[in-house]
Image (tube, rainbow, N blue to C red):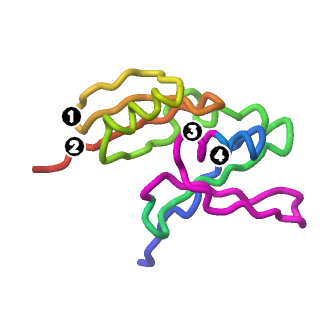
Amino acid sequence: MPRQSLAHIALVVREYDEAIDFYVGTLGFTLVADEYQPAQGKRWVLVAPPGNPPGGATILLARASNEEQVKYIGDQAGGRVFLFLETDDFACDYQRLLDKGVRIEREPLEAEYGTVAVFLDLYGNKWDLIEFRRAE
């Protein structure tokens, strides 16, 4: 069977620059691409979390292009956690979220699988910040 992997995940945003400011400026993501696509009249904007491995999945910041898409900005998963940001230093990354004024939806808790907190992006999408417990 052929090898497959996720390349990009589309996240519907209101405006490109405000989304870049949040993901790069606030969360510390890397701006991987920001290219104008003249045939479609839009930009191809990719961001990736720090330490993302080469070839790892990126987030496509996709500006809503009609009223139907606008309805889903901030609620792409119907109120559930939408994206899971894995960290190898929960305490450091959680403190950075607090220092940057990121809205925390659920305070950190220890679970069987690791340490997790829920935060909101600039639109209200729910994210897990999670450090998985390693097998000993």
Q: Position of residue 4 (x, y in %)?
A: 47, 70
C-alpha separation, residue under disc 3 versus residue under disc 1: 29 Å
Magenta segment:
22-51
Residue 35, above or below 61: below
The amino acid sitting under disc 4 is Leu
C-alpha separation, residue under disc 2 versus residue under disc 1: 8 Å
The residue indicated by pointer 3 is: 26
The residue indicated by pointer 4 is: 11
The residue depicted at 63 percent of the width and 31 percent of the height is 122
Q: Position of residue 101 (x, y in %)?
A: 53, 26
Quick check: marks 2 and 1 in contact, CB under 8 Å?
Answer: yes
Comes first in the chain, label 2 or label 3 = 3
Mark 4: few, some, or many residues within 10 Å (few <14, many ≥20)?
some
The residue indicated by pointer 1 is: 112
Is 30 contained in the magenta span? Answer: yes
Q: Is residue 102 left or right of residue 93?
A: right
Kindly give the residue lying farthest to the bottom in the view shown. Answer: 2
* Disc number lying in front (2 or 3): 3
Q: Secondary structure at mark 1?
A: loop
C-alpha separation, residue under disc 2 versus residue under disc 4: 28 Å
Comes first in the chain, label 3 or label 1 = 3
Comes first in the chain, label 3 or label 4 = 4
The residue depicted at 21 percent of the width and 34 percent of the height is 112
Comes first in the chain, label 2 or label 4 = 4
Residue 61, above or below 111: below
